[in-house]
Image: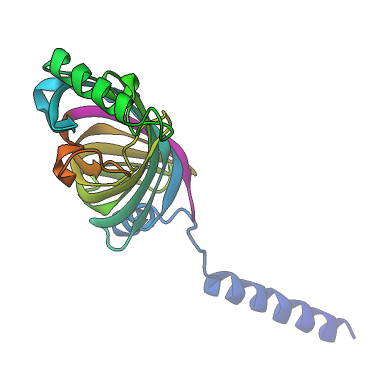
Amino acid sequence: MKKLFFAALSLLAATQTFAAKEKVITDTSMSGDNKSGMSYSDRGSFGPYIEFSNINMDHVNYSYKVQEHAHDISVDGTSIYGATGTLPLMEWFDIFLMVGYQHLGVSHSPRDPSAAYADLAEIADLYEDFGDAPVDSTTIKGRHNIHTALFQFGFDLSIPIFTNYNYQLMVKPYVFAGVLVGKTFFSDNTKFLSPLLYGYAYGAGVRVAFHGAYLTAGVRSSHEYFHTYFERRVSETKEGDEFMLDFDTFFQPFISVGLTLF
């Protein structure tokens, strides 16, 4: 009986020794350079976005006419507030979407005030017995408040210069380019229709990811354009009552902070 007990004990010890030799230890740190690089390059992200914009009249082209009279304008705008998201397709290639809001203020006045107000008086006399005139003094001189909804879609090219899976950290500079579309909403009592807006944008930045969060900062340049006319024509031709705005912004700083999606 004792011999049988000692034999069973010896067999158990030998089995435990063999199992210990054959046990596979998995390194969950995945600290290899290739794996750490891919783990961060393949993550999408989403978060709020702000761009500190400043419109310089030296970079604004326009045509503003009412009753064939050319006007001078000045344009100002707020920062762009919105959200942005990225979806990596390769380690060095991402697609992105930015949705934002910006308010544009446009002050206008005729280059020849005497002639503009004389024509306004004639129209007022003409419509005296037929209801409201199609233009008034605010049409000749005033200010437009334009709310714009902006949508930017494009791609970026990046190089992860530092990735470390153990610390869940990545630093990636990138350049980007994209198309820009938007919708304007004139909130003042204007006779102009609210047109669509078109353009493009490009720039560069640095993206830092840490665990499930990210920070992106950089500069963005853009080109925006729209062209609209009076809903109810006053001049003999459509082009006699027009508003065309075509402007560029250069190296506007932006920042975005958010979460990685997976």
| Residue sticking out furthest to the top | 114
The quarter holding residue 93 reads: bottom left
Q: Quadrant of the N terminus?
A: bottom right
Question: Does 148 appear above or below 57?
Answer: below
Closer to us: 38 or 255: 255
Picture coordinates of residue 217 (x, y %)? 30, 32
From the top left corner, tell me how far across and down residue 235 is, in percent: 19, 39
Measuring from the top left, give residue 58's x and y in whole percent: 9, 22
Seen at 58% across and 76% down, the residue is: 18
What colour scheme was applied to this rendering of the protein? rainbow
Q: Which quadrant of the structure image shows residue 77?
A: top left
Name the spot of residue 248 as percent of width and height, x first: 15, 33
Residue 49 visible in the picture: no
Q: Is residue 64 above or below residue 35?
A: above
Relative placement, left or right, of 77 versus 157 is right
Residue at image coords 76%, 83%: 7
Residue at the far front in the pictured view: 129
- In the rendered structure, does residue 258 fall within the stretch colored magenta? yes
Q: Quadrant of residue 215?
A: top left
In the rendered structure, which segment of residues is drawn in magenta? 251-262
Q: Nearer the viewer, residue 160 or 85?
A: 85
Front residue of 58/135: it is 135
Q: How many marks?
A: 0
Q: Is residue 247 magenta?
A: no
Residue drawn at 30 percent across, 30 percent down:
126
